[in-house]
Amino acid sequence: MALMVFLNRVQFGEGALAELPAELALAGILRPLVVTDPGVVAAGLLDRLLAVLPAGMAHAVFAATPPNPTERAVRSATQAFRAHRADGVIGLGGGSPLDLAKAVALAATHPSEALAPYAVVEGGLSRITGAAVPVVAVPTTAGTGSEVSRGALIVLDDGRKVSIGSPYLIPRAAVCDPSLTLGLPPRLTAATGMDAIAHCIETFCAPRENPVADAIALDGLRRGWRALPDAVADGANRAARAAMMLASVEGALAFQKGLGAVHALSHALGALPVSPHHGTLNAVLLPHVLRFNAPAIAALVPRLADAMEIADASVEALAQAIGTRNAAIGLPSGLAAMGIESAQLPAAAAAAMRDHHHLTNPRRATEDDYLRLLRDAHPGQGA
Ligand SMILES: [Fe+2]
């Protein structure tokens, strides 16, 4: 048996931002709260969005989304939502503002003040209802795919980084205009792009039956793997920017099938105080997880290698190609270079065991497996 669902309206292409008013009208949003972050504002993208809102539309802005969105930030943004008497949320930015937008749509309309009861791992799926107000997502990075996904990653007050997910949190529309990513710096282009590529690879390897998702994942992988170096080398390369934005959408359309150990571990590490970037973590972890998964994914490797145009269809060749690619696009070679200390690895291994993506890794991992894997990914500190 397979459950296959494809998902929301996606306005895609150069100039798609002009479709925002029509999408707001379809979603029934008359008084939006725009959720974004300081980097997006500084890049002039909030101004571009506000310029296309219908004349006279009463809007409010919450621009203080932190790099990894917190429950505290959700409270602040929800206050802004209520003060404005908003009826919907526009998420503008990378994964963090989009996730925060979804969390506000939930928090403003559901009974629990605390967010923990809504976490997937706490059985939150059944507590999230259609009372959630509509969200329209406008991504300004290409990687997270949050614009078409049901999930929001939030760091709770107790320090856990959890996924809150429900079909009711899928944005009503994604307005995907690649021109919004033209100014994204090379390092962020690289990191977010590798998040998209990790989605495609991990969900393709997840042990659930969903051949449609597999096909989308392979298409996204082919597109993203080919375009990412060009997007990093020349941010103004519009064809590469569009390819990356589509790979991002495809990765997230496909990952309803499940992710795996890369994301279980990156969620655990993403809750650390140094707030490491999600995509960078995934890029660093991906070769190590592929090697760990090798016994379980042998039959899948030829199709991955084909999509990545790698002649040697072996796990080791894929892992090495990803490591080489990471270096070529300016990403760090290991966790130590990201400011993560070896003493923090055991707790991360334990936390990964509690992440819901742990359950869809193709090879069942133990806490010891995760710790070994993290130490392999943490060269240079003798761990
Ligand atoms: Fe991700």
Image (cartoon, grey):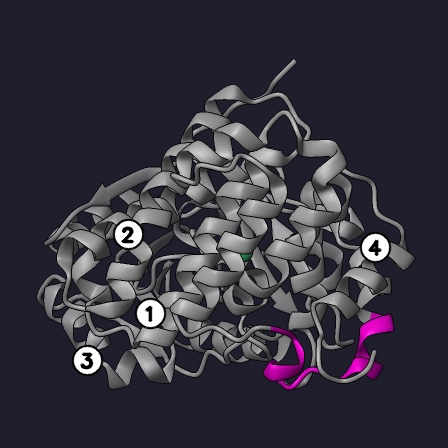
Q: Name the mark on residue 353.
A: 4
Q: Choose the circle earlier in sequence order: 1 or 2.
A: 1
The location of residue 137, given as percent across then percent down, is 34, 55
Q: Upstream in the sequence, badge 3 or badge 2?
A: 3
- From the image, tell me which residue sits under label 3: 44
Figure disc tally: 4
Determine which quarter of the picture holds residue 3.
top right
Q: Position of residue 221 (x, y in %)?
A: 41, 41
Say which amino acid is labelled 2. Ala
- Real-space CA distance between mark 4 and mark 1, rounded to the nearest whole angstrom: 35 Å
Q: Position of residue 88 (x, y in %)?
A: 37, 58
Whole-number angstrom distance, CA of label 4 to CA of label 3: 41 Å
Looking at numbered disc 1 in the image, what kind of residue is underneath it? Answer: Val
Q: First in sequence, mark 4 or 3: give its number.
A: 3
User: Which quarter of the frame holds ligand 1?
Assistant: bottom right
Which tag is nearer the camera, tag 4 or tag 3? 4
Residue identifier under label 2: 227
Answer whether residue 190 is magenta in the image: no
Mark nearer the N terminus (3 vs 1): 1
Distance from disc 2 to disc 4, alpha carbons, whole Å, reads 34 Å
Distance, label 3 to label 2, CA atoms, is 25 Å
Residue placed at 42% from the left, 77% from the top?
A: 83
Provide the residue designation for mark 1: 34
* Marks 3,1: beta carbons within 8 A: no
Secondary structure that dominates the magenta span:
helix
- Tell which tag, 1 or 2, sits nearer the viewer: 2
Boundaries of the magenta span? 334-347
